[in-house]
Structures are given as C-alpha cells and as structure tokens.
Image (spheres, grey):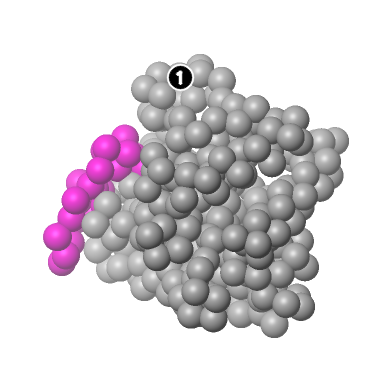
Amino acid sequence: MAKTIDRVLVKRDPIGNEIPVVFDSPHSGTHYPDDFGHVAPMARLRKAEDTFVEDIYEHAPAKGAHLLGALFPRSYIDPNRSLEDLDPNILDGEWPEPLAPGQKTRMGHGLIWNICDGAIPMYDRKLGVDEVKNRVETFYKPYHTTLKEALDEVYARHGRLWHVNCHSTTSISAPNSPEGKAGIHRADFILGDRDGTTCDPAFTAFVRDVLASLGYEVKLNDPFKGVELVRAYSDPASERHSIQIEINRTLYMDEETLVPHDGYADLKANITRMIEAICEYATRT
Ligand SMILES: [Zn+2]
C-alpha cells in the first residue's frame, strides 16, 4: 500500500504487522518545480538536499514501520519550518497572516530559503505572495497533513508512537550554521530531541547506543536540536515520541558531487539495523 501525490510525496505503509514507528524524510526530494525561478546554480542549490535519505531508510516498511518522503526540494519550501517562519523581506507584497521569523530565517533558511550553500543568493527578485501561497498549499500542507494522519492513525491503534525524522548534514559547518562559524567538523550522527522535550530521553539514549555500537561517533542536540517536524506532533507525556536523526553525508556520498561512494551500502545496511532496533524497542516498550 502506498499513497503518492505526484511531485509532492510518497508514503509507504508497513509490510506485515504494523509497529508504531513512522519515519519521515522531508528533505530528500529532487523534483525541482518549473516555477522555482531561482538564479543560484543547480549544483549549489542541490547542496540543500538531504540527497538519498529516503533510499537509505528504504527497508523501514519491511520492518513494520511507515515511511514518508517528500519529492519536492527543501530549497523550494521547507516542511521543517512553521508557517509563521517566513521572512517578509523576500516578498513583493504583504503576507496575509502574522509572521514570526526565527534566527535561521534571518540567515536565509526559513520556510522559504533565499540563501544556499553557505552564502549564495537564490533569487534576483522578490517572490510573489501568490507564488509562495501556492508552495504552501500544494507542497507544504499535503506533506504535513499526510505525516500528521499517519502519526495520529498509528497512535490511535497502539496508544503510543515513535516518530523518526530523517535528515543528513554537511560534514563541516558554513558561516550561517548553528555553530556560529565555518569550518567546524561534525560527528557521524547528530540526534535531536530539542533538549529532551520531544521524546523520552531514554529513547534518545537507546538510539545513541545502537549507533555507537555500530562504530559511529554520535552527538546529542549539538549542533542540531531538531526543528518543526519533531516539535509539532510530539507529546512524550502521552507516549508520542519524536526524534531527529542527522547522518553526516560523507558516510555515504561525495558531498560536493552528490555521488554515492563505496561506503553507501554499508551505511544503508547499518541504518537498516538501526531501524530494526527501533522497531524492536517500540514493540517491547
Ligand atoms: Zn534535513
């Protein structure tokens, strides 16, 4: 069973018995819409993608979990931001709703990015209000609705839920990165639970231990704590747990050319082991 919205998302259901685990990959989409209208070179723009992450988690349904992936690129509209997190200065007119742009947004990485690959301007124009509204209605909202439906349905059936929000990261920080400066090397994996607020800290520790046992260096909430998708639908007190997992891109591809390297299959096999461990944890907890 699968749900597909053309050029927007693909949602795959568990094969066999459902386990209350939902994986989502919001940033691995590579279908660039015709009306994007960017001036940044494609190679620079594509650095914003979490390329191949949905494929790396491909075996989640075979382990009993749900898997959702976006097909549109996060540089077009970012599902991991709130709808208020929009910089009004990038628009050519008045936005009809109240806005509350955050710090990342002022650095060019809000709901609609205007800076990519460190410091490259994405546009030579202001964006139309209707143009951005279309990105919200056609891409952002269906992604959130589909994720929320999957989470709510699983929770209704099981009374508990583990949501794993799947990403990848550049290996070295950029000038506008949360580290505050360029050139900082990142760990193999960075787990984010917004400082223990989006899932049971025991679950974060469990995932950390699984990855460490596979030989990886793992950091917690440093420098990425998780953003909107782990915040929006989590409630650990009610057994709704969300965690963000960032994979260092150098574990599976050349991060300049986005071409998978020899380590891709090993990394994917280890992620499959992690998926299996998470599904076992969700079964016994
Ligand atoms: Zn991401």
Main SS of the magenta part reads loop
The residue located at (50%, 34%) in the rendering is 220
Res 221 seen here: yes
The residue located at (47%, 50%) in the rendering is 200
Depth order, front residue of 176/121: 176
Looking at the image, the residue that sits furthest to the front is 284
Task: Point out residue 186 in the picture as x, y percentages from the top left corner.
Answer: 56, 25
Type of amino acid at the residue the image marks with label 1: Ala
Q: Residues within 10 Å of mark 1 (few under 14, many from 20)?
A: some
The residue located at (65%, 27%) in the rendering is 217
In magenta stretch: residue 97: yes
Q: Is mark 1 within 8 Å of ligand 1?
A: no
The reply, left or right, for residue 227 in relation to residue 105 is right
Where's the C terminus, which quadrant?
A: bottom right
Res 113 seen here: no
The residue located at (48%, 80%) in the rendering is 156
Tell me: residue 275, above or below residue 191.
below
Image quadrant assignment for residue 257: top right
Q: Write down the residue under mark 1.
A: 182
Task: Point out residue 95 in the picture as x, y percentages from the top left corner.
Answer: 18, 61
Number of numbered discs visible in the structure rendering = 1
- Stretch of the chain drawn in magenta: 86-109
In magenta stretch: residue 143: no
The reply, left or right, for residue 68 in relation to residue 118 is right
Q: Secondary structure at mark 1?
A: loop
Where's the N terminus, which quadrant?
A: bottom right
Task: Point out residue 32 in the picture as x, y percentages from the top left corner.
Answer: 55, 58
Depth order, front residue of 237/54: 237
